[in-house]
Image: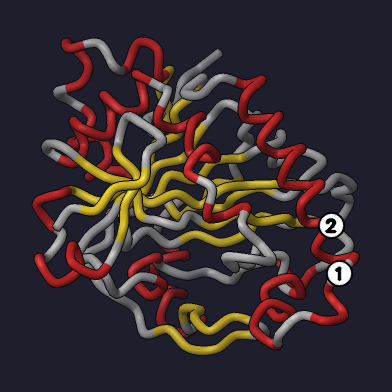
Amino acid sequence: MTISSWELDARTAADDPMRRDLRARMNRTGFLVLRNALDRRAVIDLGQRLKSEFHRLRGEASGFSEELSKSLARSEMPAHEEIARFRLDPRNYEPLTSSRPLTTILNALMGGEFFWHFPTMFREMSPSNGKGSLPYHQDFSYNAHYPSLMTVWVPLSDAGGQAPGLEVVEASLDVKFKHGPQGPWEFGAADADIAPVLKRNPVHQLMTPAGDVVLFPELTLHRTNLRPGMTETRFSMDARAVSIRSISDEVKAKRRFIRGDVAELVKLA
C-alpha cells in the first residue's frame, strides 16, 4: 500500500530517526494522519459508552436547559456537573494519554511538554441528522484561550466509509479566515474567502478506522465528510493539545488541564 505524504504509522513515526522530520511534514501538508496511534479496542469501547450516554441524555432531554438541548440537537455531548458528566470524566482521556507513540509525536511537533485542554468535545454524527455536520472552519475560532493548539481528531468508530468522517484541505495556512454563523454553528468560514484555497489545494476525504488519529494546527481548514449513501453513525472525540509554554499565567490560574501522558486533571497555577 502506498503511504501518502500526510500519513504515518505511529508505531514507527515515534522512532528517533523519523521524528525530526515531523514538523517539516506538518508544515508542508497542514495535517498528519497517524495510523495505529491508539488501542483500537479501547477506542471502540469509549465510543460505545459515548453512544449509551447520548441515548440516556436524549431520553431525559425534555427537562433540559436551552443550552443543553442545543448541544444535543447538533449532536455534541453537553457538559454539566450533575446532568451530563461524561465530558468531565478524566478517565475518558486514557486512550490518548496511554499511547506512547502519540505522546512522543506530539512532544516533537509542539517542541516540548504539552497538556490536554479540558474538557474535550465528543460528537455523534448520523447520516440521517445533517444538523451535526460541521461546515469548513479553522479551530482557532472555537478556542480563544491559547495562541496556538494542535487538534487531535479521534474517530471512536470506523469513519469515512459507511459512516461520516473528516474532510481536510492539504494546505499549510498562515491566515485566519473570517468566521460567522452557518446553520446551527457559531463559526464557519465564508465560502467566498476559502474558495481560492479549495481551488488550488488537494482536498482529502479521509478513511480513518478506530485507532487512527488526525493531527492539525488551528489554521487548517476542515469539515465533516458526509456523503450520500452513508448509513452508519460515527462517534468521535475532538481533543486539543496545548504547549505548556503557550499557556498564559491568567489562563493557568482559571483553567484545569489533563496531563499529556496521564489521564489526571491538574491545575498549573
Which residue in the protein does label 2 denote?
56
Q: Position of residue 176 (x, y in %)?
A: 28, 75
Which residue in the protein does label 1 denote?
60
Residue at x-position 32% and y-position 60%: 218
Residue at x-position 20% and y-position 21%: 19
Q: Quadrant of the C terminus?
A: bottom left
Q: Characterize the local packing of mark 2: few (<14), some (14-19) or many (20 or more) Cα atoms within 10 angstroms.
A: few
Q: Does any portion of residue 42 appear in the rendered image?
A: yes
Given contact means CB atoms under 8 Å apart, are the residues at marks 2 and 1 in contact? Answer: yes
Q: Is residue 65 left or right of residue 237?
A: right
Residue at x-position 56% and y-position 19%: 39
Nearest the eye: 228 or 54: 54
The image's mark for residue 36 is: none
Q: Quadrant of the N terminus?
A: top right
Q: How is the image coloured?
A: secondary structure
Residue type for callout 1: Glu
Q: Position of residue 30 (x, y in %)?
A: 33, 48
Q: Is residue 263 left or right of residue 184?
A: left
Q: Position of residue 80 (x, y in %)?
A: 59, 68
Q: Position of residue 5 (x, y in %)?
A: 37, 30
Nearest the eye: 252 or 136: 252
Looking at the rendered structure, the number of numbered marks drawn on it comes to 2
